[in-house]
Image (cartoon, rainbow, N blue to C red):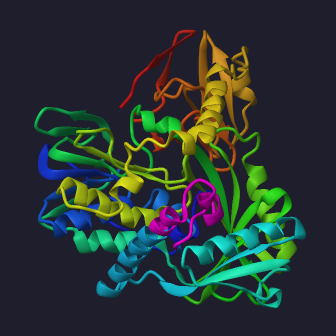
């Protein structure tokens, strides 16, 4: 089964209404994931009235496709951070992430949220001698930053390793159950929550902002784009690399590893994340990895196949039960961008979490709420979305934007003969060129043909077919669309244009 993460399977359902008509609040929050709801919670504490909208179901976006791991280190590991910043800054990042972590843990305890929260240790290991030095370096940086890091004997690990370390006091949970429960806790007079409500336009005027949606308009003093990456066209998008990563959940026949977060480096420095998950009497092995730039994989299915091969090599896998993909945006200088979209703006963004978004999402709630209320926050400057780190971001900035430029210039080949429509099999998608239009054409499993424009409405790149998740993915800034053109992810505000056949000609027109 593809696109269904294990968190979706073991979650509840929500039934918040769809927005119908015009409404008003102090703050409008776009996005009902961990960032949006954490921000809503902090704003309510500070006396604000908020409205939260989500274009689908609460928690059903990025929050439901993560690893469910909570830790104070970072995906790119602390030694990468130490290569760009001094020890003081590394300590600041860890302290900030501890605060985000604590906010999640406190909510779970205070509101008795049933989300499988379990404390555990975080492990980093080298699966071969070639990566042994990574562990030595990370151990040194972690200790310098004040973390209680220690060497672990290889016999303790679930797989064969050459060197391993651990940090205690980390945790795991089901992020979707957490977000859904938090929404229920917050929903009320001061926090109105709406599902199936998509923002189509965001306007900033002299004394207020206006969010236009598919169900009505929201007037607010401030707007928070808790959408993983900002909607529309913003300069910060040039500092982000959009990546797709995959996860599988397996039933295994032998003992699973101890509770814990296991990150391992293997051939050519490739990292795999391993953990187990238990719910309702079932136990699963989860393996996550194989990232690639969005829309730039030749065969997306090869990435999930590689995860399965890895799992079967190291564990007694009986069946791969679930497979899913998740998206993240890597910041050029390794730190997320949280705060006003530009100086003086009343629109706020939170992006560039890499794969560390659960803790950063909770942290962002506090940072944004404090900035809206003009309260001091010790980490405001560190994560400011308007900061300028040219030397720290330069190399990554250049590589990401050269990659985007190549995608703009690339003329993805289309089949000139419209008879190619007939050649598309169920579950397949292709780019077909007809009457000067590049068409995104796919056939669903029930043999229905779906045709949309292949031009991403964000910045006019040509989308590519994702054969794992059956979606159209933009290789430039990470927008993703379902087979009917609807926006799944990324900065695009509008669906892929509808294609209309008039006689033998093709016409494309915009659809909200």
Whole-percent x and y of residue 345?
Answer: 24, 39
Location of residue 78 with respect to 397 vertically, above or below: below
Whole-percent x and y of residue 496?
Answer: 48, 30
Residue shown at 48%/37% (left/top)? 237
Location of residue 50 with respect to 186 vertically, above or below: above
Q: Is residue 78 magenta?
A: yes
* Image quarter of residue 161: bottom right
Foreground residue, 113 or 36? 36
Residue 50 in the figure: left or right of residue 459: left
Residue shown at 31%/60% (left/top)? 367
Q: Is residue 320 magenta?
A: no
Foreground residue, 501 or 30? 30
Where, quadrant-wise, is the N terminus in this rendering?
Answer: bottom right
Whole-percent x and y of residue 355?
Answer: 56, 59
The magenta stretch is 72-93
Residue shown at 82%/70% (left/top)? 132
Where, quadrant-wise, is the C terminus in this rendering?
Answer: top left
Q: Is residue 149 visible?
A: yes
Q: Is residue 279 visible?
A: no
Foreground residue, 82 or 218? 82
Whole-percent x and y of residue 310?
Answer: 82, 67
Residue 72 in the figure: left or right of residue 301: left
Q: How many marks?
A: 0
């Amino acid at each position: 089964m593809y696109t269904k993460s294990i968190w979706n399977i073991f979650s509840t359902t929500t039934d918040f209404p769809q927005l119908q008509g015009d409404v008003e609040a102090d703050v409008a929050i776009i996005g009902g994931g961990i960032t949006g709801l954490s921000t809503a919670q902090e704003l309510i504490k500070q006396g604000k009235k908020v409205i939260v909208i989500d274009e689908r179901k609460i928690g059903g976006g990025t929050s439901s496709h993560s690893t469910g791991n909570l830790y104070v280190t970072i995906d790119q590991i602390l030694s990468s951070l130490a290569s760009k910043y001094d020890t003081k800054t590394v300590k600041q990042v860890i302290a900030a992430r501890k605060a985000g972590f604590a906010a999640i843990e406190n909510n779970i305890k205070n509101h008795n949220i049933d989300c499988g929260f379990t404390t555990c240790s975080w492990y980093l290991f080298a699966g071969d001698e070639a990566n042994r030095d990574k562990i030595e370096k990370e151990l040194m940086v972690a200790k310098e930053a004040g973390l209680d890091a220690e060497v672990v004997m290889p016999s303790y690990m679930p797989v064969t390793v050459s060197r391993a370390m651990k940090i205690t006091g980390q945790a795991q949970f089901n992020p979707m159950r957490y977000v859904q429960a938090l929404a229920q806790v917050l929903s009320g007079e001061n926090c109105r929550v709406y599902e199936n409500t998509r923002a189509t336009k965001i306007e900033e005027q002299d004394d207020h902002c206006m969010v236009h949606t598919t169900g009505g308009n929201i007037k607010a003093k401030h707007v928070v784009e808790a959408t993983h990456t900002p909607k529309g066209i913003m300069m910060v998008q040039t500092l982000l690399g959009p990546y797709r990563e995959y996860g599988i959940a397996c039933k295994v026949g032998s003992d699973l590893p101890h509770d814990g977060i296991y990150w391992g480096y293997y051939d050519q420095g490739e990292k795999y994340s391993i953990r187990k998950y238990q719910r309702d009497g079932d136990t699963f092995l989860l393996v996550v990895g194989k990232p690639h730039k969005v829309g730039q994989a030749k065969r997306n299915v090869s990435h999930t196949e590689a995860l399965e091969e890895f799992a079967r090599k190291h564990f007694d896998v009986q069946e791969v039960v679930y497979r899913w993909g998740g998206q993240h945006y890597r910041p050029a200088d390794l730190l997320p961008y949280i705060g006003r979209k530009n100086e003086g703006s009343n629109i706020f963004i939170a992006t560039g979490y890499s794969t560390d978004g659960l803790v950063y999402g909770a942290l962002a709630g506090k940072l944004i709420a404090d900035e809206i209320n003009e309260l001091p926050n010790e980490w405001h400057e560190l994560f400011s979305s308007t900061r300028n780190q040219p030397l720290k971001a330069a190399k990554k900035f250049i590589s990401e934007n050269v990659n985007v430029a190549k995608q703009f210039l690339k003329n993805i080949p289309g089949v000139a003969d419209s008879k190619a429509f007939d050649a598309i099999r169920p579950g397949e998608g292709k780019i077909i060129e007809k009457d000067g239009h590049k068409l995104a054409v796919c056939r669903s499993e029930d043999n229905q043909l779906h045709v949309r424009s292949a031009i991403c409405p964000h910045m006019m790149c040509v989308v590519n077919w994702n054969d794992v998740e059956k979606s159209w993915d933009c290789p430039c800034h990470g927008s993703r669309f379902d087979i009917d053109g609807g926006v799944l992810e990324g900065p695009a505000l509008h669906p892929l244009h509808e294609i209309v056949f008039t006689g033998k000609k093709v016409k494309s027109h915009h659809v909200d």
